Every structure is written in C-alpha cells, then in structure tokens.
Image (spheres, rainbow, N blue to C red):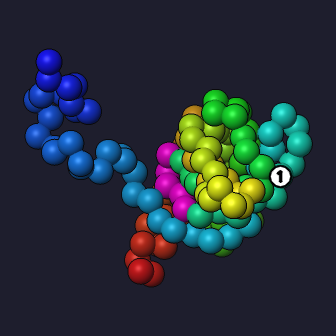
Amino acid sequence: MTPPRPYAESDPRPASAERRRHARARHDGPLTVLVAGRAMDVRLRDLSAAGLCFFSEEPLDEMSLLDVRLDLPDGVDDEFRAKGAVVRCERISPHLAHYEVAVFLHDIADTQRHRLRDFVTGLQGEL
C-alpha cells in the first residue's frame, strides 16, 4: 500500500514544499497572551498574518484559546489584538522548562491582519 501524500496528486509542489500561505518573519520581542483570563508575558519568536510562535515557561494545551496583545512599532498608537488557538506546544529541551508555542490567529479584524502583514513585510525587507 502506498503511503498518503501530504498534498493532493494534482498539487505540483513536492512533499517537502513550504505549506505556509503567509510570509513569516522572525521578531524577538515581548508579547502578552491571555489564557483563561490570566495574562502571561512570553517571548515572541516569529509571526505572520495568520499566526505566531512564542517561547513560554509553561506548557499550553493544544486548542487552548488565547487573546494576543502586541505593541507593533508600526507608528499606529493602538495595541495589536487578536484571538488565536494553540496548534503546537513543544518542550524545547528535556533539560529546560521552556516551550515553543505556535498559535493560529482565527479571530482577527481585517485592519489588524493588514497591520500585521505590513509589519512582517517590513521585517523581511530588513533581512
């Protein structure tokens, strides 16, 4: 029996092709997430118009819902806000109690998504 391919047979991309639909850029900075009404200060690793990844000192369950608050240095006075769901949480090392957490932003206003996309594009231009 042939193992299933990650893409449909009509998809011309190889199995190893990047599947992200949105550009992603590294950005090391503080981030506040609210999980069940509790604020957690974490360290942002990277972000895109669809999601972000951060480092946390405590694990979060997959599918946990959270609110994201981020100060984007984009000249806009208001704080960036969105709602997301944890799609991955992995321990960085067996010797450290630090976790890498990936979040899909599922509830985000169009204006906020455009801000985030513009911010990521600007970061990519700095590379």
Specify whether 72 is left or right of 97.
left
Magenta residues span 46-50
Q: Observer-nearest residue: 21 or 77?
A: 21
**Residue most toward the top?**
1
Residue 10, placed above or below residue 21: above
Q: Residue furthest bottom?
A: 126
Query: At 57% from the left edge and 41% from the top edge, which residue is drawn?
Result: 88
**Magenta-drawn stretch contains 102:** no
Q: Secondary structure at mark 1?
A: strand
Q: Name the spot of residue 68 as percent of width and height, x first.
A: 72, 48
* 84 lies above or below 32: above
At which x and y percent is residue 119? 53, 65
x, y percent for residue 89? 62, 44
**How far from the left and from the top, in percent, is residue 113?**
54, 49
- Any part of residue 111 in sight: no
Q: Which residue is mark 1?
A: 40
Residue at (49% x, 55% y) in the render: 48
> Residue extending furthest right?
38
Q: Is residue 87 left or right of residue 65?
A: left
